[in-house]
Amino acid sequence: MVYGTTGNRIGRINAAGEIISFSLPTENAGVMSNISDRTGDLWFTEYQANKIGRMSLSGYFTEYELPSANSAPFGITEDREGAIWFTEMNGGNIGRLTASGEITEFELPSSDTFPSFIVPGSDGALWFTQNQGNSIGRITTEGDVTEFPIPTPNSGPVGITGGPDGALWFVQIIGNKIGRMTTSGEVEEFMIPTSNARPHAIISGENEDLWFTEWGGNKIGRITVQGMVTEYPIPTKHAEPHGLAMGEKGEIWFAEECNRIGRLIIST
């Protein structure tokens, strides 16, 4: 598992719990999201430095300055062709970065929707949450944008992922729900049992399920594609889990605001 920290470093932890970390070239970069691309390199957003970063597993860094000042890049993903896509929370753009380092920014219909996380959909487009717009956005690789409203008002969508059923699944940090949207824009919503759970990130699992963090509930949640939710409390109080990832053996790794990395193993 790879993670970013407020210490301005990128860290890697193995199954034995051994950690190695690398200092970023830019001070106070504010790493928000990271992914591993098809070549094994890491890509990440530098929210405070207004850059997109790239790191080899040996710790070699490349950084790309964004054209729009103070754009606050947040979510990041890779498309089918290997291009890197990212959201810009300030100004409301979706960005694309090619392997040759060329950056293109696509304007959204509104500049104040706070686009957050972004993922590829099963239809080949990129899908993203609009935290303040209460909607899910879709952008084609040519830059055409469509927006789909969320039924719950002011739900605060944040994390989003492609589900094992081909739909997009997303969390509602204020609405306290998990949402499911088909590629045609049809929406279902599932309530989280814990009140004020404040779900933040979500990933697809291995067994027709998805996993999400509960920042307010101090739990890791699991939801099946049928909408059944199970919650697993975190031993450390006020851990405030945010990002999460799946390990090679199906275990769930998650980052805690209390300066810990957690691992959840489900007994079979």
Image (cartoon, rainbow, N blue to C red):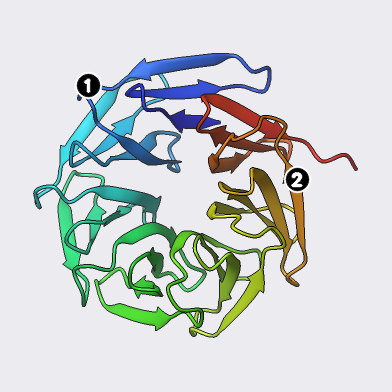
Find the residue positioned furthest to the right.
268
Q: CA distance from mark 2 to mark 1?
A: 37 Å
* Residue 126 in the image, given as x and y percentages of width and height: 39, 66
Horizontal side of 245 relative to 44 (left or right) equals right
Up-down relation of residue 211 to residue 48 (above or below): below
Using the image, tell me which numbered label, if any, was put on residue 232: 2
* Residue 81 in the image, given as x and y percentages of width and height: 37, 57
Kindly identify which residue carries mark 1: 25
* Of pointers 2 and 1, the one earlier in the residue sequence: 1
Using the image, tell me which numbered label, if any, was put on residue 206: none
Toward which corner of the image does residue 100 lie, by quadrant? Answer: top left
Total marks shown come to 2
Residue 80 seen in render: no
* Residue 228 in the image, given as x and y percentages of width and height: 77, 66
The amino acid sitting under disc 2 is Tyr
Residue in the picture at 60% in, 67% down? 177
Horizontal side of 201 relative to 82 (left or right) equals right
The amino acid sitting under disc 1 is Pro
User: For the residue labelled by badge 1, is the local secondary structure a helix, a strand or a loop?
Assistant: loop
User: For the residue labelled by badge 2, is the local secondary structure a helix, a strand or a loop?
Assistant: strand
Residue 170 seen in render: yes
Residue in the picture at 57% in, 25% down? 260
Residue in the picture at 55% in, 39% down? 240
Q: Relative to the observer, which residue lies in front, 238 or 165?
A: 238
Up-down relation of residue 18 to residue 123 (above or below): above
Could you classify mark 1 by the number of other residues whose Cα lies within 10 Å: few (under 14), some (14-19), or many (20 or more)?
A: some
Toward which corner of the image does residue 251 lie, by quadrant? Answer: top right
